[in-house]
Image (cartoon, rainbow, N blue to C red):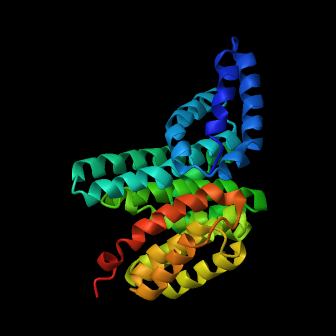
Amino acid sequence: MHAAVLRASLVAVVLSSGCDLTTRIAANETSAVLRQASHALEEHWDVDLVGAGLPGSILQLEGIYAVIPDDELMGIEVIRANGSYAWGWLENDAEDALARGDLEQQEAIALRMRLLNLRGRNIGVHHMRRRDAGIDAAITGGPDTLRAYLASHYGEQGHAQILFWTGYAWAGAIQASNTDPALVADLPLVRVLLERSAELDPTFFHGSATMALAAMDASMPVEMGGDPARGREGFERVLALTERRFFPALLQYAISYAVAAQDRALFITLLREIVDGGDPDPRVRLANRIARRKAIRYLRRVDELFPG
């Protein structure tokens, strides 16, 4: 998660600046302060409070980013804000709409999730393009071409960040648009981005690149490249890395691998671990509280997900 809500008080510095140079200086200074403040919201306990403030904060972030569109770290903050709002709040709203049979509302929310994540994907590609314009041809060339390009152009541990967030946003857009064949066809490209991120820094963002890859392996059919055993191994690596204190990993393990394998006992065990897990790591308190809410929702659906 991120500190988008804390940023609201700093936006006035940018918006009140007169000349272009002054505005850019103020925006750059504000961006640096915001990144330093980002840990505060990650430790927040009130999911509803953060969710209520996040839409306005996204617009404020976009305003700052419009002034400094070449600031990669600020671009990543926008990607994170969009993706966090889609995962933490809009996804629940879409599930509620589906549960009450309001398909029109569910589709409208899914479209919002798709657009937020596509915005994030486009920001990520923009910053990769600024590093080297060859990224466009690499993407167009397909997974093998992109893999070779990333191997030659992204070799530092710090590069894991832009690769992960670009892949994360792209995957989120695909998940929200699973009936769009053109977008679903991009999934192999997403996999390449996440694989390279995990290679460069397997610990980045609590091992989330490995977690995303494990979810793909676990939930995709074998004929489409899925590998359940590899997926389970990936989840176990992430749980070991995070000492089982990052609940989104437990949640994803349950709803991807356990559901695909129809392992009801594992599903319940993982979700109960979240529900009963308390507050094991204040640094990821907000993400863990969101995961706990989701775990409770999924436990209520156990008979639906495991009809046998």
Question: In the image as oriented, which residue stretches furthest toward the top?
Answer: 18
Q: Quadrant of residue 16?
A: top right
Quick check: 283 above or below 235?
A: above
Residue 122 visible, this angle: no
**In the figure, is residue 186 to the left or right of 246?**
left
Q: How many marks?
A: 0
Q: Position of residue 37 (x, y in %)?
A: 74, 42
Along the line of sight, the residue nearer the viewer: 289 or 177:
289
Q: Position of residue 28 (x, y in %)?
A: 75, 30
Q: Position of residue 113 (x, y in %)?
A: 42, 49
In which quadrant will I find the C terminus? bottom left
**In the figure, is residue 162 to the left or right of 105?**
right
Residue 42 visible, this angle: yes
Q: Position of residue 210 (x, y in %)?
A: 61, 71
Rendered residue at 71%/27% (across/down):
27
Quick check: 69 above or below 227?
A: above
Along the line of sight, the residue nearer the viewer: 13 or 157:
13
Rendered residue at 62%/51% (across/down):
134
Rendered residue at 59%/78% (across/down):
235
